Image (cartoon, rainbow, N blue to C red):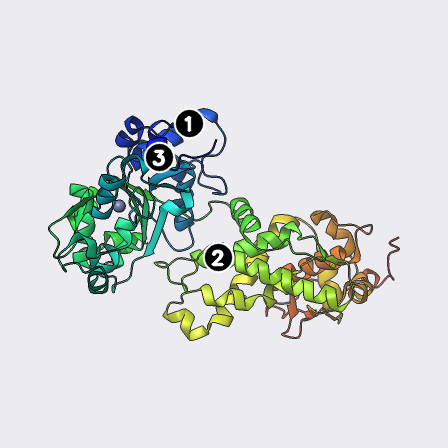
Amino acid sequence: MSLPRTLGELRHSPFSEQILLTRRVKDELRDNLLAKLRQGGPIFPGIVGYDDTVVPQIINAVLSRHNFILLGLRGQAKSRILRALVGLLDTQMPYIAGCEIHDNPYAPICRPCRDEIAKRGDDTSIAFLTPDERYVEKLATPDVTIADLIGDIDPIKAARGGHQLSSEMTVHYGLLPRANRGIFAINELPDLAGKIQVGLFNIMQEGDVQIKGFPIRLPLDVALVFSANPEDYTARGKIISPLKDRIGSEIRTHYPATVEEGVAITTQEAWIQRDGHKLHIPKYVQEVVERIAFAAREDKKIDKRSGVSQRLPISCMENVVSNAERRAVRHGENLVVPRIGDVYAAMPAITGKLELEYEGEMKGADYVGRELIRAAVAKTYDAYFKGTDMNQVVQWFDLGGEIQLADTAGAAEALPSLRNIQGLMEKLVRVNVGPKDTSETQVSAAEFALEGLHAHKRIGRNEERVFTAGEKPTKPAEKPFEREDVPFRGRRPYN
Ligand SMILES: [Zn+2]
């Protein structure tokens, strides 16, 4: 279907006066949402982990034609959800061509459009907006002015057009009028100055705005959505109460509830499908990366109020894959398999995302980061190896065994020395790895087992990634070592 190009054509199209005049943005969102609900399938594709919590509340808010706010800590996909509302807008929306505030062809509110229709009638040109063009987003900061948000007199426009300064033709529209007939999202709402909040309140209350010094009113049609940090939002005096009162629904977001959900989000968001090498990310590496964020969210050394963003595991995973990629390229390996050593190498993607409390500051971001990885490794190790007897491996180290496993070491060179460690390789069935797997996979799994033992302080490891015997507790040794138990029985045959 070709779209109507003039007002006359528009009248005889599905965009009839009868429909466009009564269907406001919130009706449109509601109608399209109802259609989606009837159709079944996901309402907000790509939003993971909110199906039973946040999504139903958003649906209710939209069905209620509410302006609403998402309250949540950083990195809880708030902006992403707000942007997803674009999917509930019509694919095409007609407006008067050239109008800065996308006037409804049947009820223009700006002077130039009204003049245009008076002059050209049904020949008035019509243009169309796509859903993306109807979404305006603003990060609130204390220096946002009324002029930014609502508008101002533009003396240059006045001079050029030969208009009086007080003429309607000299208005420079702010973001809000430019979002007319669309969605206007303000992130971090409490950071807006009080008088700007009053301006917003007016649009919600009266449905219109007044531009300073102009005797005109602009009855705008906008769906307003907001996001905020819950502590800022509930703090006294941060939000003027009449504005708060006008926000129909208040919806709390949250971090992924389970490691599996975290893995699903990170897998979707992280840039890991790269051209070039084949990639296999072991599940335990994914879980370790995710558990770093889980551990950080519970750590007293990290500021609770700002939270730990889901962007931490996402960036971390990207760096983990890069470190493994670098190793694969160096050694001419065809398969990229990340290891725990790559997670430690991904520290630059971790430390910057932690807001440290005083105690954390004292210890330093690197120390805190390493401790988080270690805790994540210990937990993940338990999930796979709990109940597995690893004494033989520990003994090998206690008897003086040592192995260096740099994160840059190729799989082919590392594997033979790992096989020397009695009792190690056969335990890797716990992570579904056996002698028939690629050497990259076997090395990664074996290193995970060693890192797990290290995380539990059963064996030692230094900064050069040399695994050694662990420091023994001071309590008396259990049983003296007996000659016939010597674990050095030579290598097991593998292939
Ligand atoms: Zn207009």
Q: Secondary structure at mark 2?
A: helix
What amino acid does circle 1 point to? Ala
Name the one closer to the observer, 290 or 461: 290
Question: Of 277 and 338, which appears nearest the observer?
Answer: 277
Q: How many marks?
A: 3
Residue indicated by mark 2: 311
Residue of label 3: 29
How far apart marks 1 and 2 lie (CA) works out to: 33 Å
Q: Which residue is mark 1?
A: 35
Q: Of callouts 1 and 3, which one flags the residue occurring earlier in the amino acid sequence?
A: 3
* Circle 1/circle 2 CB separation < 8 Å: no
Mark 3 vs ligand 1: CB under 8 Å?
no
Tell me the element at label 1: helix
Residue type at mark 2: give it. Arg
Instruction: Please identify the quarter of the rendering in which residue 338 is found.
Output: bottom right
* Image quadrant in which you'd find residue 488: bottom right
Q: At 25% from the left edge and 40% from the top edge, which residue is drawn?
A: 117
Which residue lies at the image location 40% right of the left edge and 36% below the top edge? 88
Quadrant in which residue 356 is drawn: bottom left
Label 3 close to label 2 by CB (< 8 Å): no
Q: In the image, is 422 to the left or to the right of 262?
A: right
Relative height, residue 164 to residue 33 (above, below): below
